[in-house]
Every structure is written in C-alpha cells, then in structure tokens.
Amino acid sequence: MARNMTGNSPLISGTFSAYAISGRGKASIVALPLREPDDDEIRVKVAYVGICGSDLHYYFEGANGSFVIREPLIPGHEVSGTIDVDPREEYKSGTPVAIYPADTGEVTKGLEGRPHLRHGVRYLGSAATSPHTQGALAQYIYVKRDMVRPLPEGISLKLGALAEPLAVALHGVTLAGALEGKSVLISGAGPIGLLAIVAARSAGAVRITATDVFDEPLVRARSVGANEILNVKKSSPPTDSFDVVLECSGSVHAVDGAISAVARGGIIVQIGMISGNSEGIDLGRIVTKELRLLGSFRFNNEMSLALTLLQKHPELENCISHEFALIDAPQGFEVARSAQLSGKVLISC
C-alpha cells in the first residue's frame, strides 16, 4: 500500500508506515509488514530521525552524488527510539537507544582500525548498495543488535537523534589532532558546523570562529559556543590566522577560503561533502603554506564520546530548530534545505 504524503498516515493491522523516495521529488508513505525480528535482530520503535544532507540530495535530486535511487529508498540514518522486541531479552522493552547506522563491511588489510572505510559497508538510508540499504524514516526499524546504543541517563530521545551527526563532527576533530589551546575556524554553521563547534570546544580549542553566508545560522553558532561569528558575504576571515579549519559546508568557495584563512603549516579537515570539481580552489597555496588537507568520512568509533557529550550538554537541543510528524515529511525536507530557516530538522515517527 502506498499513499502520497497528504491526509492521515495509513496503517493496516500487521503493518507499519515508512516514508520512501522513489526518484527526484517523488515520495510516498508505504506500508511494510510488521514481522518478528530474527534472533540476531532487534526491532526498534523509531522516535526521531534527523534529516541529513544526503537525505536532501536523495529527496530533491534522486541521487546523492553517484549513488542514484534505483528502487524505493527509505532515507534516514540519524536515529533514536526505544526497544520494541529483543528476541534474546538482553534489552528491556522501552529502553531508549540511538542507532549506530552501519555494519562493518569486509575486513580490509590496512584498515583494521578504520572499519568505516572498508569495502562493503552498508549505511542506513543509502543507495550506494544494491539492493539499497533501507533507512529509519519509519515507525519501526530492524537492526543488528551490535548497532544498538543505549542512551545514558538524562539524554532525551530528541537529543539521542543528534548522536550520529555529533559523531561525524567529532571524527573531524579526531583527525585534526590535539586542539588544546588552538584557534579553530568552523566553516559553515549548518547542523554539522554547530556540532563541530561543540566538538572543538570539548577538545580544548580556546578560540572558535564560525562563518556562514547567512546571519541566522551564525546566531545559532553563537548560542552553542562560538567566540566569534562572521558572515563571509560581508567580510572574509583574516588570512593565515587559524591553527585548524573544520570545513563543514562543502562549498568550493569555502574550501578556497579555508586555505586562505589557515595558518602556514596548519590543518584543514574537510567534513562537508564537496563535488569533484576543484575549479576556483587555489591548490598551489596548499604547497606554499605546507598545509595538511584531510578528508573526513562519516565516523569511526566516536559515537560513545558523542553520547557522553550529549549527556554533559543537554543545551545541544538548541541545535534542533524544527520537528515534523512523519506525515509532514515533505514540509520537513523543504525547511531542512534552507540554511536560513533551519538548524537540525527532526521527523517524529
């Protein structure tokens, strides 16, 4: 059963509702069978799913880079919920959890300690695999038990949905190395940029400057701990001034700005996904300034630290700007694509 995203969400006995994207701008509520989990699975009742940049690409473009939707895809990998059924009864029903959204893929020589880079990793809500790896934008999700992360006391289900994107920001900080006493530029004050501010602060950065092309995200950046904010449409960051740049926007212009702003011998960590076109980036300055430019892909083992930080900083809920019901997911996607309107947008399932 499928239905366009208008009216009341359909639910038939023995089924549950999920939100599936079938192509560019094409999405509907679908009914899936509610089955008992296998022995190595846990059925989780989904509470919240955060809308990520990759979800926006799938929704509005029908593809995320080279990963094209070839069959209906349920998006969503930023997930919180409660245990519904655990066949082994290791977890009590109702236990609040976040979900680690990937399996470990094939063991790859040289990547023993970096499972997120192995071949064959399946990530929730991704068209990179065939068949696609279905995501969590649904009332229920079936996951392997090693993907379950119980929420520490004091973390709400809303905050729990931030564990995955905070882990992404923390991975970028991990790659940057020691930040104690250093000045850090956060390029792009979207949801990942906001969380990168918190991650950099937790790692000991003493001066954090956030940049964006809109004033509204910069206000949110100030609220989560940025010392300085700068609208790059009005003025550029000072050159050769930052020990580390965490580039979170994915904009080619921002990458070039990061190369200019970082100090000689400094580090740039590219967290935001950029296109393959490097036109407009003065790559020669990477050589003359002897910079280290590092790519940061998803995260490794930073989710435990993310949960610890969420427990210590419940004010991170300020990163959440909007919440929509599953039936109103189209409106949620429209709001989430606007950096002026939104921080992190959650869908309540």
Image (tube, rainbow, N blue to C red):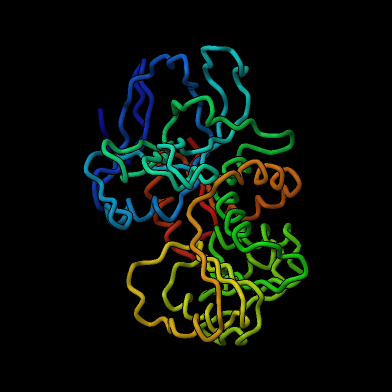
In the displayed structure, would residue 184 be above or below residue 167? below
Q: Position of residue 201 (x, y in %)?
A: 72, 61
The residue at the far left in this view is 70
In the displayed structure, would residue 208 be above or below residue 148? below
In the displayed structure, would residue 246 be above or below residue 258? above
Q: For residue 11, which quarter of the picture?
A: top left
Q: In the image, 9: left or right of 245?
A: left
Q: Nearer the viewer, residue 321 or 250?
A: 250
Q: Residue at x 76, y 65 (%)?
A: 180
Q: Residue at x 42, y 33 (%)?
A: 138
Q: Position of residue 133 (x, y in %)?
A: 35, 37
Q: Residue at x 45, y 85 (%)?
A: 284
Q: Position of residue 149 (x, y in %)?
A: 60, 32
Q: For residue 32, which quarter of the picture?
A: top left
Q: Residue at x 56, y 67 (%)?
A: 189
Q: In the image, 339: left or right of 184?
A: left
Q: For residue 158, which quarter of the picture?
A: top right
Number of disc labels: 0
Quadrant where the N terminus sits is top left
Q: Position of residue 333 (x, y in %)?
A: 40, 52
In the displayed structure, would residue 118 be above or below residue 272? above
Q: In the image, 179: left or right of 33?
A: right
